[in-house]
Every structure is written in structure tokens, then in C-alpha cells.
Image (cartoon, helix red, strand yellow):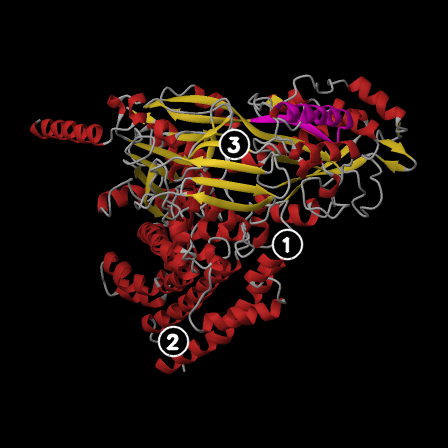
Amino acid sequence: MFVYTFRRTLLAIPLLIMISIISFTIINMAPGDVTSMFINPDSDPADIAALRAHFGLDKPLLVRYFIWLGRVLTGDLGTSMWVGRPVLDMIMERLPNTLILAGVSMLLSFAVAIPFGIISATKRYSIFDYTSTTFAFVGLSLPNFWFGLMLILLFSLKLGWLPSGGMRANFDEFELIDRLRHLILPAIVLATGTMASKTRYMRSSMLEVIRQDYIRTARSKGLSERVVIYKHALKNALLPIITLFGLLLPSLVSGAVITESIFSWPGIGRLVVEAIWTRDYPVIMGVNMMGAIMVIIGSLIADIGYALADPRIKYN
Amino acid sequence: MRKIIALVVLMAFLFGIATAAYANPYDAKRDPKRYGGTLIWGSFSDPIYLNYLVSTDSASVDNISLVYNRLFKYNTKLEIVPDLAESHRWSADGMELTINLKKGVKWHDGVEFTSADVKFNIETHLNPDVNSTRKGNFTRVKEVQTPDKYTVKILMSEKDAALMSRLAEMYISPKHIWEKVDMKKIRESEHNRKPIGTGPFKFVEWKSAERVVYEANLDYFEGRPYLDRIIYKIVPSQAVLMVQLQTGEVDVAFIPASEVARMRKVNRINVKMVDAPIVDVILWNYQDPTDIQKPNALFSDPKVRKALDMAINKKAIVSEVLKGVGTPAVGLYVPALPWYNPNVKANPYNVAEARKLLAQAGWKMGKDGILEKDGRKFQFQLLTNKGNINRERITVVVQRQLKPLGIKVEPRIIEWNTFVNKHVMPGKFDAYVGGFSTGLDPDQTLFWHTKEGVKAGGNGFNRVSYSNPEVDRLLEQGRGETDVAKRKAIYNRIQEILANDIPWTFLYYQKRNWGINKRVTKFNVSPILEVHDWADWAVK
């Protein structure tokens, strides 16, 4: 297992380099660059050229890529061209906020999806199954911006129960209740979208498992239905969910642009969108690479988790 | 109860200190009962640099206006009045401006503000290492001298009437902080995020993408501001910003035109409309988009431009796109400005006359209902940038309005950077819908001078390469004329010529609509954008 993990980690290096080359090329193919945010129409072309040279934008793409790569290898993600701050600072400032929001919404969606999936599977074609399937699809098709605004209109404007945005009240430093009040609406919006697919996953994997021979054996042993489902079936039915969890891991750090914007949540999603608008290459690359690393870690965790949960799987 | 009494006593005590300690001539104007409270100002975007030397975006300048001062500012009548300056005087030949400064003004860290600060700021804008976007404002300045701590002498290389308005825009950053910073790396300095100014509010904290907090500068040279605190709160979604205005989570915010009617009905807020020096327009290209040396087959003919100007119903656009929040435009000079020429009138909306003009220009109706001339059909793409909903709608309304005349318009919405770099700047378009902010000075060289055009290799806003030698001459004359009355005559004439030449179709003057919570008992909103004495604002 250790050797396997080590080999996967080594394999990640060329993968990351490939990803960085592709994203570097793509973002540089977009027209314009950050200097158009600085210049006035009456700017002297020589000044614009000087500004480009200052940011190193006058060099060929390949040279710029290697300069960037060289810096990254020494642990320096560079400085934002637009804001003038170190990219790492900018990411680290937003990352905890995104982690909290995405983490809570992921917990929330699993907490709802797993029991709903199980019940839907065991009571297949019951009213509960139909209702939860309907809700799952409604949730899946609700656009985030619309659902978010509706929640704000109801809970903030009409009822006045919850704040309509932001991460904390204006002066208070960290306080749990205050933070939860601000978290609850965006977390619900984010969770609702993904809850649907998770419920469906859980339902189908449970259905598959309870048709297996060993479940029939367990039942014929005279075990109670509860023990059969929750002890014998659930363990095996959770396997695909582990994969799902691994695949969802990158979303913990990539941020949710629309939800963050609607709820004024200071997360990574808004950071990267602003960076794209201003063609702030170092920031875009920084966030991209972080996302890429999380994808690799996520799939590695999923594979390892798989092996741990299922003794039939061995990696050599 | 006891707590409340204690609090009242404490407040009264603090009040006593505040009023006793700051015996300032300005305090006499202030009503002592109004001191205190927090104002929350909501906006879509984070500021970038809280330093006028490098800032370019409006969110930054809004924040800067809380912390810093200028040498001069505009009053509500849009006259230039002293701010950090005490008085000023031009030499008879207009080549030397002497400014006397207020004495005893302190930066928030206690250092005295002096003439050296002024010199440093102008020189920094001109410093090639800084790449200031405001360099062009001061290129006619030859030298800045500081005969003593409270006197600044600006020597000109060429007469420049616009200098006073430039100085009335320039917020002054402290020399003693910035002189230690490597000017090549000025944008990377941490001081951009913790400003020290002379202004009514002191910086407290800035949480990116959340809020910037300011507290009252009790030593402000015009007396302490009424408010204790101002919080600049960042709410990226416009819809949610409106909700927050309604719930009172935000006290002040700009309301988009489409929301004005609804927000007027909200009990909690006042809607205050002011003119903005922003005009939305359609630019008709004089050049062929495929080869800028050739004239445009459609729009280089003045009769065609006049016909289009008459066939586009500006009133209908204002009511349909802006829901009535705007005024049909005559030119690029906004009526609220003293430079506006009221004798210039827009072409009336007259489709029959437009048809006649097109026929005179040689355009005949084709079989498919589209005008034709020498085998060319009258059809073109009307471009605009993505993200501005008003402009996107305008392209469709214009398409509909021109269709009965046999003109086929294809609206095309393009992402901003592509729009600017691939179409607008190289002159590769037939026509586009744009918006221009003119500022308060009447100099419009950037918009109309031949040398600013694409053909002349200029970088100005004259992307259609409009060229009229008389306008060029008048613009140069106006820039050098320091006599206000003579200057006004020059710009009156320019407005007349432009109304006749119709290089662009001026659609409407925009409005800015402040939404202000009724809790705010005193506010200062001038008839035009971005002029507000924050020290005078108060809340209940």
C-alpha cells in the first residue's frame, strides 16, 4: 500500500506539469492582458510597453511559463498583477472561508442523502421513494442563483430571521451562533444541488447490494431487517459513496462562484472569477494548480479508501 | 436599567470631552446632538488600492474619498473650492500657479501635511516607474516648487486650463510613507492596504471581499465628522444589495435604474436621483472595419448618420431600457455641468425625414425589404460588451426601430476584453453601443481630436476617426484658455459643430440613484456624481 501511494504521488508530478502547461496556454489565449486595466486612452504607447515589460508580459509564452514554473518550484506562486499582493496570501485568506462553506454543505448533503437513499431503496416504489426522488430531481434542477435569492427573500426580507449575506456580523469577532446564522442559507443552497445525485447513488448502490446472495443468507438466518440492512448491506453499499466523496473533494477548495456571490461569501470562487476578468494570470494559475492538486489527492484518497473498505481490492 | 443609565452618563461624559477638546471653527457649524453612529455603505466590488497614486477603479476612489483630501474640491454648484488649499492664484501669463496651503493639517499618524507632500504626489504621477494612469493629467507641468512649507508653485511648460480640475480630483498621499517605497514596486506595497490620509475618517481594517472599516478622525481639520464609523460593505450581487437596503443591513447604496420604481415604494429608504456625467451612445464608424484606410460604406455619409440619428427613438429607449430613469441626450456635455450649451438641440425623432435622407443618400429599397446601394445591402453588426444589460437591450431596441426603414441590424454581444482589444481599439466594427464618463472638466480632446483617432494611431476614445480641423483647433485653444468665460464660448462652439456633424448618436444621460436609509438624517449628495462631504453625514 505504501509503495502504491508513493508511486501514485510520483506519477502526479508529470500530471501536474501537463495540467499547468495546458491551463497556462489556455488562459493566455484569451484576448487582452492585465495592462488594459491600468491604462488610460491618453497613455503613451511607450508607457504601456513599459508596464508590459514590468509584468514580464513582453516575453514569449514559453519563457514566461518557465519563469512561472521556476518560481513555483521554489514555493513562490508569484504576485498578483492586478492587486499587487502575493498570490499565496490571497488564496490563504479565502481558503478557510471556502472550506467552511463547502465542508458544511457537503456534510449536510451526505447527512440527508445517505438515509434518504437507504429508505428509498428498502422501501422501493413506496410513497417515500417517489417523494424523495421527486425532491431530488427538483433540487437538482433548481438554479443556485434563483434558489438562493428565494431563500433570501423569504428568510431575510419577509421573515427577518437570518442575515441576507456575508460571513459574520459587522463587528463581532468569531462567534459560533453568528457564524452559523450566516452559514445556513448558503450551505442549504449548495447542498441541495448535490443532494439529489448522492441520494440516487445511495439508492441504486443499496438496491444492488440487497439483491445479493449474502443478504438473502443473512435474512434466512433469521436476522432482523434492521441488522441486515444497517450492518450487512450498508457497509457494502457505501463503497461507491467513497468514490463519490473522493471526486467531490476538489469542490471543497474550488469554491462556488454563484452561491458565494449571492451570499457575499468571501471565498475562492469569487477570487478566481475576478482574476479571470482582469486577466490576472498568477492568481488564475495559483487557484488552478490548487484545484488540480486537490483532484489528484481526492482520487488517491478514494482509491486508498476503497482498498481499506473492500478487502478484495489490493494495489500492487 | 442601571446599565442604560451608566451608558447614558458615559456617553454624555464622552460628549463633553469631544466638544471641549476640539474647539475648531468648523464645529460651530455642526449640531452637537447629531454626533455618533455607524453608517454602512454597500457596494458591489472590493477596492483594490487605497492609494490615489495607483488606484484606477471607482470602488478604490470611493474609499479613498473617506480617508484623503485633495487640494481643491467641487462644491454642490460644481465650482472649484479649496480643500487642503487655502487659496490659489494664476500668474498673468497662465504659466505659473501659486497655491497657499492650510496650516496645521495633520496626517492620521500625526505628521504635518506640507507643500512637500503636494510636490511628491504630482511628481509621483509623472514618474515613469509608477506607470500612473493619471500621468496625462500633469504632462504640461514643468516643475513643482516649494518656496516654504505652506506654498506650492506649479510651473507650466504649456498653458493648461484643465489643471485646476485635475488638482480637484487628485487625493494626496503622504510623502513620508511613500518616499521609502521602491516606486517600481509601488503596487505591491502593503501601505496600499492600510492608508494614512488627512481625511475625515481613519482606516481601521480591511477584510477582503467582506468590508472595509473606518472610524472618525477626531482631529480632522474641519472638525470631527458626525459619524463614529463608516463600514464599506461588499455585496457582489445587485439583487441582494437591494434586499439589504430594504432590511436595513445596508444604509446607503446605488440603485440600478431598473429597480428605482420598486425601491421608491419601500418605506425605509429615500431615493435620491442625481445626474451622472455618463452618456450612453452609438458610435458610427467612419472607417471600413476590414481596412481602416477606406471610408465606411454605410456611415461615412453624413446624411446616413443624420437619418439614423432621427430614426432612433431616444425617448422610447429611455422608457423601455431605463424605465424612465434617464434623459435623452443632446451631446457629450451633461446638462448639470456649467459647460453645457442649452442652445444646441438634438435632432427630432422623425422616421419620414430619415427615410427621405436615406433616399437622398442613394439607398433604395431592395426586393427583400432591405435598403441597397451599388450592390451593398444596408446591414451591419451592432456590437456591445457583455455584462451591461442596458446596452445589451439597446442593441435589440435599435434593431427593431431601424427595421421598418429597411435597415438590418445584427446585435452582437462580446466579452469585455475581446470587445475592447479586438474590435474597439483597432477600429474593427461598423457600430457599437458604448458609454462614456466625461469628468467635470470640459476638455474633450480624447473624444474628438483627429490625433486621438484610429487612423492617426491615437489611443483616445475617437475610435471612429472623426476629424474636423475646426474642432481640433478649438480643442487645443480650449485647453490653453484659463479665462472661464472665454473657455465657455469655445466649448459652446464645439457642441454646435458636433450636433451638426453627428459623429455619434447620443442616446441618454445616465442618472445615479442613491438609496439612503431614513435613519440617515444628514447627507450630502451633489447634483453630480462622486462629490460628498463625508464629515457632514449623520445618522439617528
Residue B436 vertical position relative to residue B129 in the rendered view, above or below: above
Q: Nearer the viewer, residue B140 or B1?
A: B140
From the image, tell me which residue sits under label 2. Answer: A313
Q: Tell me whether circle 2 and circle 3 mark residues in contact (CB < 8 Å).
A: no
Q: Is B488 inside the magenta-drawn segment?
A: yes
Q: Amino acid at mark 2?
A: Ile
Residue farthest toward the left in the current orientation of the protein = B2
Whole-percent x, y for residue B24 in the image: 28, 28
Q: Residue at x 38, y 76 (%)?
A: A313
Q: Amino acid at mark 1?
A: Pro
Which secondary structure class fits the magenta region best? helix
Q: Residue at x 57, y 47 (%)?
A: B135
> Which chain is disc 2 placed on?
A
Q: Tell me whether circle 1 and circle 3 mark residues in contact (CB < 8 Å).
A: no
Image mark for residue B89: 3
- Residue mark closest to the camera, 2 vs 3: 3
Q: Nearer the viewer, residue A100 or B258?
A: B258
Q: Are marks 2 and 3 on the same chain?
A: no
Q: From the viewer's perspective, is A22 left or right of B222? A: right
Q: Residues within 10 Å of mark 3 (few under 14, many from 20)?
A: few
Read off the magenta span: B485-510
Q: Amino acid at mark 3?
A: Arg
Report, in whole angstroms, how far the alpha carbon at label 1 lies from the one at label 3. Answer: 48 Å
Q: Nearer the viewer, residue A98 or B16?
A: B16
Quadrant location, the N terminus of chain A? bottom left
Q: Residues within 10 Å of mark 1 (few under 14, many from 20)?
A: some
> Which chain is disc 1 placed on?
A
Report, in whole angstroms, how far the alpha carbon at label 1 lies from the one at label 2. Answer: 48 Å
Whole-percent x, y for residue A261 in the image: 43, 44
Q: Is B425 inside the magenta-drawn segment?
A: no
Report, in whole angstroms, how far the alpha carbon at label 2 lies from the one at label 3. Answer: 88 Å
